[in-house]
Image (cartoon, grey):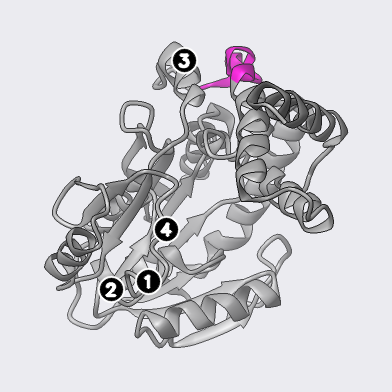
Amino acid sequence: MTIDKYHNSHQNVADKLVREYEGPTPFALYLKTYFAANKKHGSKDRKSISAICYEYFRKLSAQFPLTSFISSSIDIPKFTASHLQQPLLFIRARPGKKELVKATLEKEGLFFESINEMAFALPNTSSLQNIIVLNKEAVIQDINSQALASLLQLIPSAEKPLVVWDPCAASGGKSILIKDTMPSVQLHVSDIRENILFNCEKRLKEAGIQPASLQVVDITLPFAIKKQFDFIFADLPCSGSGTWGRTPENLVGYTELQLTKMTQLQESILHHLMPAIKTGGYLLVATCSVYQKENEDQIQKLMDTGKFKLVAQQYFIGYEKHADTLFGALLQKITE
């Protein structure tokens, strides 16, 4: 079979996969399932077919969904154009491990760029398995997820260790960031999903972190507040629109109704979390969204309650760094 015939064959397979994909399963998992059931495709075939599929989705960035809802802080032409390229792979060296990680990357001959005091950028196709001891020596984490540490650093230290809650722990990346930035805190970790929490606990153990508690809590519903916290880091569920450069299949058909449902879920979560923060304590709200309704508008609603004052808020822009775009806001609770 000639190269052209190979390409035509791969194009036909990719066309079929894209046409039949309906979500909500991530497209990467959809591809993995397909290739597992069709072992006739070798590694080069899989790589070529995947590339054709993702190229199709990336070209849809010119019709980015709901641009009228994107925050005025975002340069929309630059943001949408950035989706034509896949973001980089970023890793953050754990405290005291920067030189070790750098030496290992150099020894393995991997192409990388040192970004700041602790971070490295690599091509997205880089494999770090069996090279870096992940979670112990370094954490795979987008450069702007790492940048949320700048808001953590605005929280003043206290004589006693701060009691901190990460209620949307997911894979544990934020929990590790909290402990690396604020080592003395007493960290409590939870998530709505037991299986996710199991994986989170495993990852924290690899990172050498023992949380004060780890439990399943559904913060979308009212829950019993046994004690108040000095600080809550709420990484809210969101559209994920700031990360669609990594999952460009989401550029297809995201609707205003979906956005409305997500903002309603966010409001419910924040309403349930407010009583769990001590007066004088702090709330860090973060999303990986560029939509104002999920970000600035939610912060304004918190301030409108009269219970919070804004310490700082900002977008962490990714489209000039081949990275994700995130939003973060730090508030202090001033009254019950």
Counting residues from the start of the chain, the first of labels 2 and 4 encountered is 4
Q: Are marks 2 and 4 in contact (CB under 8 Å)?
A: no
The residue indicated by pointer 4 is 127
Q: Are marks 3 and 2 in contact (CB under 8 Å)?
A: no
Counting residues from the start of the chain, the first of labels 1 and 3 encountered is 3
Image quadrant in which the N terminus is located: top right
The residue indicated by pointer 1 is 134
Counting residues from the start of the chain, the first of labels 3 and 4 encountered is 3
Q: Amino acid at mark 4?
A: Ser
Q: Nearer the viewer, mark 4 or mark 1?
A: 4
Residue at disc 4, secondary structure: loop
Residue 24 % position (x, y)? 78, 44
Asked if residue 65 lies in the magenta stretch, the reply is: yes
The quadrant where residue 8 appears: top right
**Disc 1: CA contacts within 10 A as few (<14), some (14-19) or many (>=20):** some
Q: Which residues are magenta?
A: 59-70
Q: How far apart in space, not on screen, are marks 4 and 1 (Cα)?
A: 11 Å
Q: Nearer the viewer, mark 2 or mark 4?
A: 4
Point out which mark residue 76 bears: 3
Q: Is residue 150 visible?
A: no
Q: How far apart in space, not on screen, are marks 3 and 4 (Cα)?
A: 32 Å
Point out which mark residue 137 bears: 2
Asked if residue 306 lies in the magenta stretch, the reply is: no
